[in-house]
Image (cartoon, grey):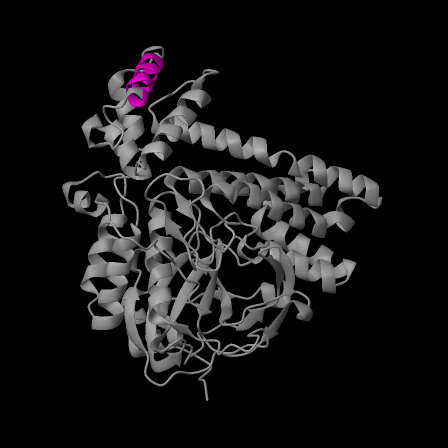
Amino acid sequence: MTERKAKIETGWNLDNSYARLPKSFFTSLNPTPVCSPKLIILNHSLATSLGLNVQALQSNDGVAVFAGNQIPEGALPLAQAYSGHQFGHFTMLGDGRALLLGEQIIPQGNRVDIQLKGSGKTPYSRGGDGRASLGPMLREYIISEAMHALGIATTRSLAVVTTGESIIRETYLPGAILTRVATSHLRVGTFEYVSNWGTLKELKALADYTLERHFPDVDVVENRYLFLLKEVIKRQALLIAKWQLVGFIHGVMNTDNMTISGETIDYGPCAFMDAYDPKTVFSSIDTYGRYAYGNQPHIAAWNLGRFAESLLPLLHVNKTQAIKLAQDEISSFNELYHCNWLTGMRAKLGIFNEELQDESIIQGLLNIMQKYGADYTNTFLALTFDKLEDMSMFGTKEFSQWNELWQARLSRQQESKASSHELMRNSNPALIPRNHRVEEALEAAVKHGDYNVMERFLDVLSNPYAHSSKQADYSTLPAPSNSPYRTFCGT
């Protein structure tokens, strides 16, 4: 039987505000204990920032919490209910293999969710075993921490433990549990669930809870729920722009994978683009390219439309007026996204001020990159460090003409060339978690029990704008292959 308490000196300081919401929003249950947990990786810096004792977390009692074998003092484990549009089709969902332990009150006074992923069956498992395998959990750890280092809002990874048990997918795989940290796990799909199956009172309770948790300044506005819609749109417009600026492809942008907080969540079939192509898709289940790189802004707007629909009863008592308010706000997403993206692209090219022709210069470069199959990340690095000969389109007429336009554009701003260079250094990462490097780290860990490859990789990913010599090897491209790279959900 799962023990109810873990030792206090680990630093857990948990509250359970979500558990005080209507009972239909979740199911209370404990994790399913595992036979022989072992700590694989612990995020020391994140643990410290959460007010946790790193040494105690590595003890048997600390590891038992990460495995779900012990419940820390103050926790009330629960599985959250939600629904969502998966590839455009609406369905009932929920935490099928995850449990929210509670909300850690960090030293600064804020609260963050502590969730175990792979902790066993829940009422929302939909026939699954509620478990996770080691590879996908390490993958989420690597990518989420890389995203954080890139300055992109994201859930974080605190720890991964193996369970000592095998799970069955296409074959037997080592079981694992990820401890995930999030500003919250409120999703667009959470609102869709309550809107479809809850009462108006419950919908209002969810919206008020969200406002209190994420938008404490709401009291200064007239329409609280319109304010909520506006703020979520703003956060998602910034998030998706940042994805595009580093070539990140989420792979499964269902509405249950879009957070209200504006954090990236659920790193399943995600990957980073090598050669620039807006049609790039890596996910094995995205047969028609719905979630391709170039479609991500459009899908985000579509998802936000579903969020707005769920809020209609709260926006105005008159449905026609509510729809108009929602449509007006949703229509602002494209402009907000585009402004964020354009600002980011200017920075990647060392441009400080604004000119009307900037967008044509940016798009001109992207068109040339696509034509010549240029690597997205390394092209901007070559421009940053004036190593134009490293680019695949170097020497072409198109690039020479574009380079003249770019140099002329830089000459028209007051800032010096050194300032432009510094702006580009701080806007173009030295490396991204290249797909082949991620696979290399996962293969060493899962197949051979060698975690050194992953640890070295995490080290260089931790400061992507350092442009250090040890990062250079990680910017090299994979060997040519006749088969395209494919990613999988890892469920």
Magenta-drawn segment: 398-410
Which residue sits furthest front? 482
Pinpoint residue 428: horizontal percent, then vertical percent: 31, 35
Q: Residue at x 40, y 46 (%)?
A: 248
Q: Would you say 146 lies left or right of 13 here? A: left
Q: Residue at x 30, y 50 (%)?
A: 433
Q: Would you say 198 lies left or right of 411 here? A: right
Magenta stretch: residue 19 in it?
no
Pinpoint residue 12: horizontal percent, then vertical percent: 42, 67
Report the front residue among 290 and 312.
Answer: 290
Report the front residue among 80 and 279.
Answer: 279
Dominant secondary structure (helix, strand or loop) of the stretch shown in magenta: helix
Pinpoint residue 31: horizontal percent, then vertical percent: 48, 78
Up the image or down, 459 lies above or below 94; here it is above
Up the image or down, 1 lies above or below 112; here it is below
Q: Is residue 408 visible?
A: yes
